[in-house]
Amino acid sequence: MIRTDHYNVLIADDEYMLRQSLKRRIGEADQSFRTVAECGEGRSALEALADGNIHVVFTDIRMPEMDGLELAKCIHEKYPDILTVILTGYADFEYAREAIRQGVFDYLLKPVSEEKLAAILEKLSLKLQERYELPDEEGISGRSAGEIVKRTERYIREHFREEIDLGKLAEEYGFSSAYLSRIFTRDRGESPVRFLTSIRIKEAKRLLADTDEPIARVGELSGYPDQFYFSRTFRKEVGKNPTQYRKESGEEK
């Protein structure tokens, strides 16, 4: 296993302000990821990959000269160890899904929320841990790993209706969110994001079955203020949309 102090990130986007915003938010969400290169289009991004030790590429799907899909394809062929995340709007959603079938690690729909970014960084971290080893941070907070996991679980249960920033939570303990995710997953068998999702979906199912709250309000009370994202997540987790679930729950009573 290769040892590294952090994971190097390259951001490719033709809009300067968006690059700066994503760079800042990645650093705030997880200190184990560090943006070391920025490019305004695909060809320069590909050239930068040849010069540096990059672990992750975030690329917009639409860029001049070489777009994100072509860049992702080249990365997959030339640098198969690099993980690529496509940034896309709803209009290009089908292109992003096709990109995943061609080797892209994952995608983020714009505008990117803090929660979605944190979830992607956690998925990236878990995948990168298969190949790279970060310095062990256990003990630097003065608390045992088991105590940190219990405190994190309690915090998630008490605040699941709010937007939870695992990066800031880990920072309070004195280490990175990658380490928090690692010890939580090791102890509980699932990541903090998966645990949070299961808590939220369980509450949504209860509200749908036992109350007459509108679907949008059920989402809000479950921690999903974006109704579209709530419905999409609920369908992914349960296999049916909230309206179908409520109807079938009523028929069973």
Image (tube, grey):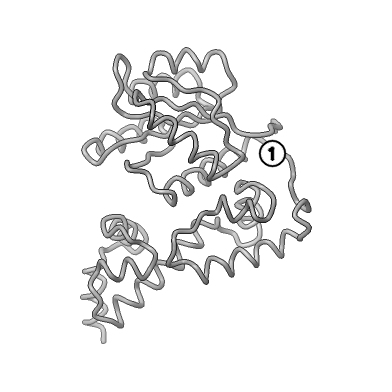
The C terminus appears in which quarter of the rendering?
A: bottom left
Find residue 248 and report its image quarter.
bottom left
Q: Quadrant of the N terminus?
A: top right
Front residue of 107 and 137: 137
Residue type at the position of mark 1: Leu
Farthest residue, direction bottom: 253
Residue positioned 75% across, 55% down in the render: 141
In the figure, 56 relative to 110: above or below? above
Residue 34: x and y, percent?
A: 57, 33
Q: Nearer the viewer, residue 188 or 40?
A: 40
Q: Is residue 120 shown left or right of residue 250? A: right
State the residue at coordinates (65%, 67%): 150
User: What residue did someone put label 1 on?
Assistant: 134
Q: Is residue 8 above or below residue 137?
A: above
Please state the horizontal and vertical placement of residue 215, each as a whole percent of the image. 24, 69
Q: Quadrant of residue 66?
A: top left
**Label 1: how many Cα within 10 Å (few below 14, some 14–19, many 20+):** some
- Is label 1 in a helix, a strand or a loop? loop
Describe residue 34's horizontal placement relative to residue 66 as left or right: right
Measured from the top left, where is residue 76 in percent x and y?
Answer: 44, 24
The residue under the point 42% across, 34% down is 85
